[in-house]
Image: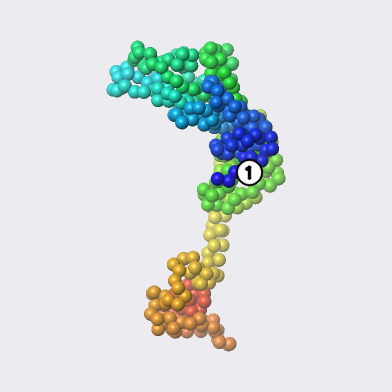
């Protein structure tokens, strides 16, 4: 698999960083990004708990995968758990399992993630969303490797590595009584900070080009290009949603501006308005459904123009060119299967004699082909679509 130039061109990136970025498709050369990847690679062989911090949409989910893949546990299970997506009433059962009859609906005993991932790595995303009682259970697992299933009095052991991630300011959450201080120190033995997109400089354009290429291929549309004003806007914009937001914006641009060069004014239509902190100044601060409707009409109009252009090209394309694409190959000496050999001998290409008008040539070709328009078009050296158009123009019945 060839190395991606967007991933590896930074001369400061060390070989292990390059390999990790290549393996997991991490695009970018920002020093802060390379430092985060390097830290993940370095801590991977050491069996310590790791806390990954960063804003939403920065790609924190790649780092526990890097850690697991470069650790001694790489052949064991890797389980990712979104703590914010599990209801508070079932989170203990999901993480630690339950016994039959432990609660209404518990018709059988069930293993939790910590038991399933024994010997491997568990990634707790959005760890700050865990309720306080569950935090206490997690602390016990981290300190002693022990846990109990819901509804059980039997202590079980597990050998597991915990990597956690959050976009929450945990020291502030501790001060507000929403997160246990002892758990914070236990999960943050090593911290990795993932930089926000706005601090990654030209990585923004590297990612935008990667996304544009991917979406153009996905939707089978011509690629979009950004002019200098659009590039400046993208580099100055703060991207509060980070890489996730950039991907969303580029997808819209790839769909609605296919084949065009996008400038700053056009790009501004796809950026959210109403936040002076994040959004560059531009006219029309409020969301406009009229503008959205105009964009859709423009897209339909552009598609219709392209269809008309393709139709015109087909009208002028000789059938001999089309046959190479649309029909299976036959040997040059073999007759066409849908016409008898005698008729084929008669249907040699017709060259209108000097002074013979086009209408007469078409009539002659139709007569020699016994009215078969496709055969007549072949004899005339034009497409069947063009022949139909000429028949209508000359009023030939």
Q: Which residue bears the numbered disc 1? A: 5
Residue 97 screen position, x and y as percent: 37, 21
Q: Which residue appears at 54% of the width and 49% of the height?
A: 217
Left or right of 129, for residue 106:
left
The image quadrant where one finds the C terminus is bottom left
The reply to whether residue 261 is visible in this rendering is: yes
Figure disc tally: 1
Name the element at disc 1. Answer: helix
The image quadrant where one finds the N terminus is top right
Residue 207 screen position, x and y as percent: 61, 40
The reply to whether residue 370 is visible in this rendering is: no
Colour style of the rendered protein structure: rainbow
Q: Nearer the viewer, residue 68 or 31?
A: 68
Residue 153 screen position, x and y as percent: 35, 12
Q: Which residue appears at 44% of the width and 24% of the height?
A: 119
Left or right of 153, for residue 169:
right
Q: Is residue 172 positioned above or below 119 on the image? A: above
Quadrant for residue 28, please give it. top right
């Amino acid at each position: 698999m060839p190395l991606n130039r967007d991933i590896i061109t930074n001369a400061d990136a060390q070989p292990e960083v390059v390999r990790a970025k290549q393996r997991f498709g991490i695009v970018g050369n920002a020093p802060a990004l390379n430092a985060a990847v390097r830290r993940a690679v370095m801590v991977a062989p050491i069996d310590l708990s790791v806390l990954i911090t960063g804003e939403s949409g920065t790609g924190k989910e790649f780092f526990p995968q890097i850690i697991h893949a470069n650790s001694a546990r790489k052949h064991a299970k890797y389980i990712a758990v979104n703590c914010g997506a599990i209801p508070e009433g079932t989170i203990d059962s999901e993480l630690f399992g339950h016994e039959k009859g432990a609660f209404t609906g518990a018709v059988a005993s069930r293993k939790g993630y910590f038991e399933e991932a024994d010997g491997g790595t568990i990634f707790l995303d959005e760890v700050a969303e865990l309720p306080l009682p569950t935090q206490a259970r997690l602390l016990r697992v981290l300190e002693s490797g022990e846990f109990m299933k819901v509804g059980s009095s039997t202590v079980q052991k597990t050998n597991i590595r915990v990597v956690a991630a959050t976009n929450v300011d945990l020291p502030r959450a501790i001060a507000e009584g929403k997160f246990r201080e002892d758990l914070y120190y236990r999960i943050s033995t090593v911290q990795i900070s993932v930089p926000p997109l706005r601090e990654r400089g030209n990585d923004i354009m590297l990612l935008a080009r990667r996304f544009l290429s991917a979406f153009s291929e996905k939707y089978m549309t011509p690629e979009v290009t950004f002019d200098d004003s659009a590039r400046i806007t993208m580099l100055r914009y703060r991207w509060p949603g980070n890489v996730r937001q950039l991907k969303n914006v580029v997808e819209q641009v790839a769909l609605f501006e296919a084949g065009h060069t996008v400038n700053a004014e056009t790009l501004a239509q796809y950026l959210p308005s109403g936040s002076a902190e994040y959004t560059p100044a531009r006219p029309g601060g409020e969301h406009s459904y009229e503008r959205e409707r105009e964009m859709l009409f423009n897209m339909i109009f552009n598609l219709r123009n392209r269809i008309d252009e393709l139709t015109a090209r087909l009208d002028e394309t000789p059938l001999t060119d089309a046959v190479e694409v649309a029909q299976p190959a036959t040997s040059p000496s073999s007759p066409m299967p849908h016409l008898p050999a005698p008729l084929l001998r008669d249907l040699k290409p017709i060259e209108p004699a000097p002074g013979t008008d086009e209408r007469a040539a078409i009539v002659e070709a139709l007569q020699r082909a016994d009215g078969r328009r496709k055969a007549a078009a072949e004899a005339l050296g034009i497409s069947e679509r063009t022949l139909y158009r000429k028949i209508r123009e000359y009023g030939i019945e």
